[in-house]
Amino acid sequence: MTDIIATDVVIVGAGPAGLFAVFELGLLDIKAHLIDILPRAGGQCSELYPEKPIYDIPGFPIVTGQGLVDNLMKQIEPFHPTFHFGEMVEAVETLGTPERPAFRVKTDAGKVFECKAVLVAAGGGSFQPKKPPIAGIDKFEGTSVHYAVRRMEDFRDRNVMIVGGGDSALDWTLNLHPFAKRITLVHRRDDFRGAPHSVNAMRELVASGKMDLMIGQVAALAGEGADLTAATVKLNDGATRDVAIERLMPFFGLTMKLGPIADWGLNLHENLVPVDTEKFETSTPGVFAVGDINTYPGKLKLILSGFHEVALAAQRVHRYVYPDKKLTFQYTTSSTNLQKKLGVN
Amino acid sequence: MPKITFVDSEGRARTVEAEIGSTVMEAAIRDSIPEILAECGGACACATCHVYVDDAWIGKTGKATPMEEDMLDFAFDVRPTSRLCCQIKVSADLDGLVVRTPGKQG
Ligand SMILES: Cc1cc2nc3c(=O)[nH]c(=O)nc-3n(C[C@H](O)[C@H](O)[C@H](O)COP(=O)(O)OP(=O)(O)OC[C@H]3O[C@@H](n4cnc5c(N)ncnc54)[C@H](O)[C@@H]3O)c2cc1C
Ligand code: FES
């Protein structure tokens, strides 16, 4: 049996709202684990616009998406949150009673958590790979078409086609090259966004005849059952080529999909979770929704709204975690108690 | 105000008015043009505002910048006339512009 991880709160999503929740909960002595499908913290800020400037974070006239995330990570360090990256929260089961809620949270990697409250900070949903609109691609997914490498062995002695021009496509081209029978890289133009040293390494392999590079786009797939046998590539010069392959890896970036949240028994309104504006609690007592994923009259999808929401939600979470303790309002500037928790006193 | 026509993947045309100085994407979203998602709100960070500029207009809209070309790598069925329409600024010159939208954005 898997060991159950016991904690006060599970936070679904490590975007700015989930990260700052660690701070607000931490000040109230509440411990949290964060789970995100991405390999790193920051949600939209680090995934979609790490280098772009944000101008409306109070107190920061200008900060980049990644800069903000780096600062949040530093700010929450004193509370030692535990991160579980690369895992999707699949199920949230209600144990306990509405007065004394308790939850069991399960991830797709098989981890099981038990906690007293759940903070859904899932933004626009979990980041998932974009699927190219090639007719019939669905039936090969999971067997012959992969959006990530789970086991290198699946590619040993196979003819592999990789599609894309960024670091993921180039890195897997180089990493799988020693394993695969033959690698064909397909990209829509002869310009690559990936790191220059990877581009050079790829070009050297092409020049020495050790792999193939095609400038064009995949137009069709053929196979038997769930097993892929060939791809038709439309080259930019107008010609088409059939290439015998057993594996295809498309890399077209990520898109946000609501995902399993729809199955957690929460009320939903147009893929958003309705909450009250006092505690940001959902229709299930003990489950809160903060940041871009929630909706209420006047909601603005701004980072600063998420910060406000987690501060208020934390107050109610405290009641579930410490039902017998009274909460007194304190400032970080003047409370020696809070400063001790922050490690500054 | 300049008029812009969006032709969807099934051939249906819709014409909207666009404010000078705004972007073609903003005009599309304001009038709920289908097949334009614009998930990132015009930051050139999502590639879900992909359009094909009509051949007759490609000289006037200009070509994609290198940053936009990088983002177009995340779009599907990219052609030489492909643009991300959040990166096309509306000017008086673009009155009558025709763009086509792809069947799938992302
Ligand atoms: C290009 C761009 C520019 C922007 N500029 C600004 C700006 O200037 N100012 C501003 O205030 N806001 C801006 N925003 C909006 C801002 O980024 C969002 O409001 C903010 O990121 C929302 O934070 P969040 O923590 O609620 O969610 P997100 O940042 O979306 O993070 C949610 C996380 O939850 C994860 N997740 C979801 N479901 C699951 C699951 N089931 N299991 C595991 N993980 C899951 C996702 O993978 C994701 O990492 C901008 C957004 C974009 C795209
Ligand atoms: S709206 Fe996102 S790239 Fe244009």
Image (spheres, coloured by chain):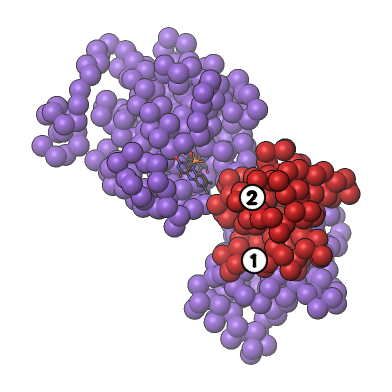
Mark 1: few, some, or many residues within 10 Å (few <14, many ≥20)? Answer: some
In the rendered picture, chain A carries what hue? purple
Residue found at the very far bottom of the displayed protein: A208
Question: Residue B85 location in percent, x, y?
Answer: 67, 54
**Which label's residue is closer to the chain start, 1 or 2?**
2
Q: Left or right of A342: which side holds A231?
A: right
Q: Is mark 1 within 8 Å of ligand 2?
A: no
Q: Which residue is mark 1?
A: B64
Q: Amino acid at mark 2?
A: Ile
Q: Which residue is mark 2?
A: B20
> For the residues marked 1 and 2, what is the alpha-carbon distance in whole angstroms?
20 Å
Q: Secondary structure at mark 2?
A: loop
Q: Which residue is nearer to you in this view: A125 or B24?
A: B24
Q: Which residue is nearer to you in this view: A168 or B21?
A: B21
Question: Residue A69 location in percent, x, y?
Answer: 38, 48
Mark 2: few, some, or many residues within 10 Å (few <14, many ≥20)? Answer: some
Q: What subunit carries mark 1?
A: B
Q: Residue at x 55, y 67 (%)?
A: A167
Q: Left or right of A58: which side holds A166?
A: right
